[in-house]
Amino acid sequence: MEILKKPLLTEKVAQLTEKLNRYVFKVDHRANKIQIKLEIEKMYGVNVTAVNTMKYVGKLKTRNTKGGAVSGRSATYKKAVISLKDGETIDFYSTI
């Protein structure tokens, strides 16, 4: 199971990072807080103080086609907000 899918980089997350030293990741929906914490510490070499998780249900989407209306859902996902110890950071752009 790959626990960390990808980091979320939005304007809202950028504000969280600047003000509160928090980072947001999309994670596997089966992963718990302990597994997420250990994976972040191992991958980035930082000390995690708190992990908050939330599940998002995919939105219902409908579109009209020649064959009639087609409905479905976007994918559901789990998001983790990671709080780091003061003075520590994660650099996402170092490998680019």
Image: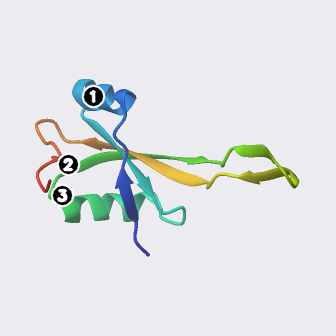
- In primary-sequence order, the first of circles 1 and 3 is 1
Q: Residue at x 24, y 34 (%)?
A: 21
Please name the amino acid that badge 3 sits on. Answer: Tyr
With respect to residue 21, does 36 lie above or below? below
Q: Is residue 76 left or right of residue 62?
A: left
Q: Is residue 56 left or right of residue 32?
A: right
Q: Position of residue 42 (x, y in %)?
A: 21, 65
* Residue 79 percent coordinates (x, y): 47, 48
Kindly give the residue lying farthest to the right in the view shown. Answer: 68
The residue carrying mark 3 is 44
Name the amino acid, label 2: Phe
* Upstream in sequence: badge 2 or badge 3: 3
In three-dimensional space, the C-alpha distance between marks 2 and 3, rounded to whole angstroms, equals: 10 Å
Mark 2, Cα crowd under 10 Å, few <14 / some 14-19 / many 20+, is few
Q: CA distance from mark 2 to mark 1?
A: 17 Å
Residue 33 position by quadrant? bottom left
User: Going 25% across and 23% down the picture, which residue do you hit?
Assistant: 19
x and y percentages locating residue 41 in the rendered image: 22, 59
Which element is circle 1 on?
A: helix
Residue at the spot of label 2? 92
Taking the spot 19% from the left edge, 41% from the top edge, the residue there is: 85
Circle count: 3
Q: Nearer the viewer, residue 69 or 48?
A: 69
The location of residue 35, given as percent across then percent down, is 39, 65
The answer to whether residue 96 is left or right of residue 39 is: left
Quadrant the N terminus occupies:
bottom left
Identify the residue under disc 1.
20
Closer to the chain start, of discs 2 and 1, is 1
